[in-house]
Image: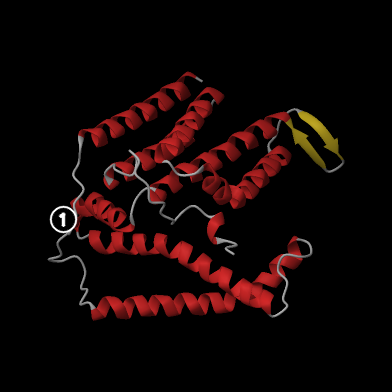
């Protein structure tokens, strides 16, 4: 039974036949970057509502099950709630609750709620990039975007390969962590009982075999790449090339308009 792998969306790929899956990887990467900028530019509830509708529409269009998205948000929801609580106590403003040394402000609660919403939307939309893009297509897309920087000595292919491997290793490492936890449970160890501090202490001894396994996998991958005579991107060709279509251009134009609308609404506030 998977414990941690299903709780993180980033790095996983969900195969499906959807309009978002068929988009060019470069267009999806650029659209994600524009979305990240826009989500921090927006500073009113109308904008956050529009970003929420856009994110939900993207999830529906991608045909990724909401159950999978919900499982992947359980860890992020904890940090979102922590952000809400901390801002409620720290952010200055009109006090609505006072308890000696601690007090909650209305402005802090609203600001914390906005930051928590930003975090959730950011993780969901960024996760759609890996959920709807195959690893090879993601590598090719990153390489294509970095290709113009080759003129100034930037190793575009190597950077794209490293980023792609890092993203794909996330679910692999989490799966290995699941196996270690199940092995420890079979030996009588408990990692799900007690308070939060006890659970963290129970997980610490499992980090050593996790890191050993990660380094071992990295070494095996390096040996496999050397055995296949991998020497970087020089002279390499691509077996499958996804063409740039009008829908990709339309996607970028829509997100550029979204960013422009976010900047305009911020200037009016």
Q: Residue furthest left?
A: 235
Residue 80 visible in this rendered orientation of the protein = yes
Quadrant position of the N terminus in the picture: bottom right
Residue 37 visible in this rendered orientation of the protein = no
> Residue 229: which quarter of the image?
bottom left
Q: Position of residue 43 (x, y in %)?
A: 52, 28
Q: How many marks?
A: 1
Q: Position of residue 78 (x, y in %)?
A: 65, 49
Give me the residue at 26% from left, 44% from top: 24
Q: Residue furthest right?
A: 100
Give me the residue at 75% from left, 64% from top: 197
Viewer-proximal residue, 184 or 234? Answer: 184
Q: Is residue 188 above or below residue 172?
A: below
- Disc 1 packing (10 Å; few <14; some 14–19; many ≥20): few
Q: Position of residue 131 (x, y in %)?
A: 41, 50
Viewer-proximal residue, 107 or 118? Answer: 118
Q: Which residue is mark 1?
A: 151
Q: Position of residue 223 (x, y in %)?
A: 31, 81
Q: Is residue 187 above or below residue 153?
A: below
Q: Is residue 102 left or right of residue 188?
A: right
Give me the residue at 52% from left, 67% from top: 175
Viewer-proximal residue, 103 or 8? Answer: 8
> Residue 187: which quarter of the image?
bottom right
Q: Is residue 22 left or right of residue 57?
A: left
> Residue 162: which quarter of the image?
bottom left
Task: Name the colour scheme.
Answer: secondary structure
Give me the residue at 41% from left, 22% from top: 264
> Dot 1: what SS?
helix
């Amino acid at each position: 039974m998977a414990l941690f792998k299903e709780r993180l969306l980033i790095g996983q790929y969900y195969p499906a036949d959807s309009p978002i899956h068929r988009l060019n990887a470069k267009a999806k990467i650029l659209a994600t970057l524009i979305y990240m900028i826009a989500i921090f530019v927006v500073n009113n509830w109308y904008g956050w509502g529009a970003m929420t509708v856009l994110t939900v529409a993207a999830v529906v269009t991608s045909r990724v099950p909401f159950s999978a998205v919900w499982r992947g948000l359980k860890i992020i929801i904890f940090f979102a709630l922590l952000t809400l609580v901390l801002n409620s106590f720290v952010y200055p403003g009109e006090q609505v609750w006072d308890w000696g040394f601690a007090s909650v402000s209305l402005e802090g609660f609203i600001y914390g709620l906005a930051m928590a919403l930003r975090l959730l939307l950011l993780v969901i939309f960024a996760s759609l990039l890996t959920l709807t893009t195959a690893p090879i297509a993601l590598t090719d897309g990153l390489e294509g975007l970095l290709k113009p920087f080759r003129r100034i000595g930037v190793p575009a292919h190597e950077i794209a390969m490293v980023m792609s491997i890092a993203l794909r290793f996330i679910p692999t490492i989490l799966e290995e962590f699941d196996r270690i936890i199940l092995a420890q449970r079979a030996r009588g160890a408990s990692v799900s009982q007690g308070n939060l501090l006890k659970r963290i202490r129970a997980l610490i001894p499992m980090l050593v075999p996790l890191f050993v396994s990660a380094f071992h996998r990295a070494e095996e991958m390096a040996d496999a790449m050397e055995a296949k005579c991998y020497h970087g991107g020089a002279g390499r060709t691509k077996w499958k090339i996804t063409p740039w279509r009008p829908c990709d251009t339309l996607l970028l134009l829509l997100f550029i308009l979204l960013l422009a609308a976010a900047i305009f609404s911020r200037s009016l506030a």
